């Protein structure tokens, strides 16, 4: 039916919880789902043995220890038990809507790439997937309390094996490699299908403690910049906006606004540049010049907060009671 492959962080603390949640959800998609986990991180072998997953401990890495995308994609396509494969980040819970979407798209075309937006959701505890309705409850939780991320967050890629043969030495664990994967399919004239409206991919929120500089390091360190260079620069960094088709309730429909995606990205970069320039050349100089006067008048941030935000009575700060709780 489907081979899903991924690579984890060490199975410690919160990372262990969310990764086990994700892996269990994949196994429950279909009795014939094949799951491959790459890497010898702490707890990976034990988790694979417990959940009945295939474990590939060897992964080619950089000197810094980050994993090469090309090795994982090439090896997964070689050993996959099924023609349709999926790379998913190891913190994504997938439910039956994902399985149905894969079946529809795979029946539509021989060559395709299916991607979609994710739903950021706070999940901090192990999920009991032995409960029959657990997957649907997780999906409802994401829709009710989660937040659907913008189109530049791409966390799963479904395609038929053999699609990705030549991959530059991009690394996983930094940004830009996922955008290159979307661009490459389009460059090969392969239809890219946006499944965002059909699939609730539940991303379990987490921190970035695996990088010493946190999220800023993941986005801006030398390896992230190197990923952007290897990908060919911004021209080769596509998002879900660049999908040429969308998965609709009654079929797979052509998208036309994807032609505007490059212009949208240019406008976003221009807006970011203007905001940064405003902070550097207007906001910060203004604050420096007015700081002595503001401090003399007591116009500090904490004082303004006390003036502008009234103190609430403890009774008022309680969470509102649900109407049905009085029954």
Image (cartoon, helix red, strand yellow):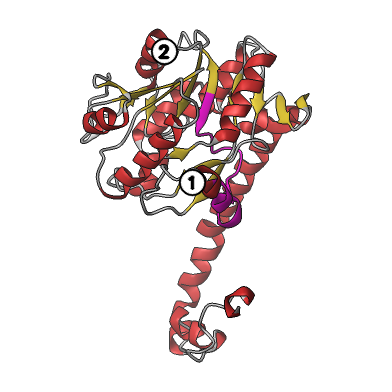
Residue bearing the label numbered 2: 80
Where does the image place residue 303, in percent across and percent down from the top left? 46, 86
Q: How far apart in space, not on screen, are marks 1 and 2 (Cα)?
A: 28 Å
Q: Which residues are magenta?
A: 139-157
Residues at discs 1 and 2 in contact (Cβ within 8 Å): no
Quadrant assignment, res 36: top left
Which residue is nearer to you in this view: 166 or 11? 11
Q: Of circles 1 and 2, which is in front?
A: 1
In the image, taking residue 241 as reference, residue 223 lies left or right, namely left
The answer to whether any part of residue 238 appears in the image is no
The C terminus, quarter of image: bottom right
Which residue is nearer to you in this view: 62 or 131? 131
Q: Residue furthest bottom?
A: 313
Which of marks 2 and 1 precedes in the sequence? 2
Where does the image place residue 1, in percent across and percent down from the top left? 51, 17
Q: Residue at x 36, y 18 (%)?
A: 72
Quadrant assignment, res 170: top left
Which residue is nearer to you in this view: 34 or 110? 34
Where does the image place residue 68, in percent across and percent down from the top left? 34, 21
Residue 134's tag is 1
In the rendered view, tell whether residue 106 sits above or below residue 134: above
In the image, taking residue 108 as reference, residue 232 lies left or right, namely left
In the rendered view, tell whether residue 120 sits above or below residue 43: below
């Amino acid at each position: 039916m489907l081979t899903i492959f991924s690579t984890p962080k060490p199975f410690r603390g919160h990372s262990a919880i969310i990764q086990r949640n994700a892996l269990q959800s994949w196994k429950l998609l279909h009795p014939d789902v094949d799951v491959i986990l790459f890497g010898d991180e702490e707890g990976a072998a034990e988790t694979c043995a417990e959940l009945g997953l295939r474990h590939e401990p060897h992964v080619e890495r950089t000197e810094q220890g980050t994993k090469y995308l090309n090795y994982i994609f090439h090896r997964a396509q070689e050993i996959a038990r099924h023609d349709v494969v999926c790379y998913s980040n190891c913190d994504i819970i997938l439910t039956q809507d994902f399985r149905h979407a894969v079946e529809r798209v795979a029946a539509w075309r021989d060559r395709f790439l299916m991607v979609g937006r994710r739903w950021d959701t706070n999940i901090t505890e192990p999920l009991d997937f032995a409960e029959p309705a657990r997957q649907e409850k997780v999906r409802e939780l994401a829709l009710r309390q989660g937040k659907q991320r913008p189109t530049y967050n791409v966390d799963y890629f479904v395609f038929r094996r053999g699609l990705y043969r030549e991959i530059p030495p991009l690394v996983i664990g930094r940004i830009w490699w996922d955008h290159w994967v979307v661009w490459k399919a389009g460059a090969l004239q392969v239809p890219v299908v946006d499944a965002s409206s059909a699939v609730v991919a539940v991303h379990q929120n987490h921190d970035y403690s695996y990088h010493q500089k946190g999220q800023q390091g993941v986005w801006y360190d030398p390896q992230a910049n190197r990923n952007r260079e290897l990908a060919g620069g911004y021209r080769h960094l596509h998002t879900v906006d660049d999908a040429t088709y969308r998965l609709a309730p009654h079929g797979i429909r052509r998208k036309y606004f994807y032609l505007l995606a490059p212009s949208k990205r240019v406008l976003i970069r221009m807006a970011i540049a203007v905001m940064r320039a405003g902070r550097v050349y207007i906001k910060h100089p203004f604050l420096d010049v007015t700081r002595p006067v503001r401090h003399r008048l007591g116009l500090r941030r904490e004082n303004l907060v006390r003036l502008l935000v009234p103190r609430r009575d403890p009774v008022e700060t309680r969470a509102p009671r649900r109407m049905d709780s009085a029954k």
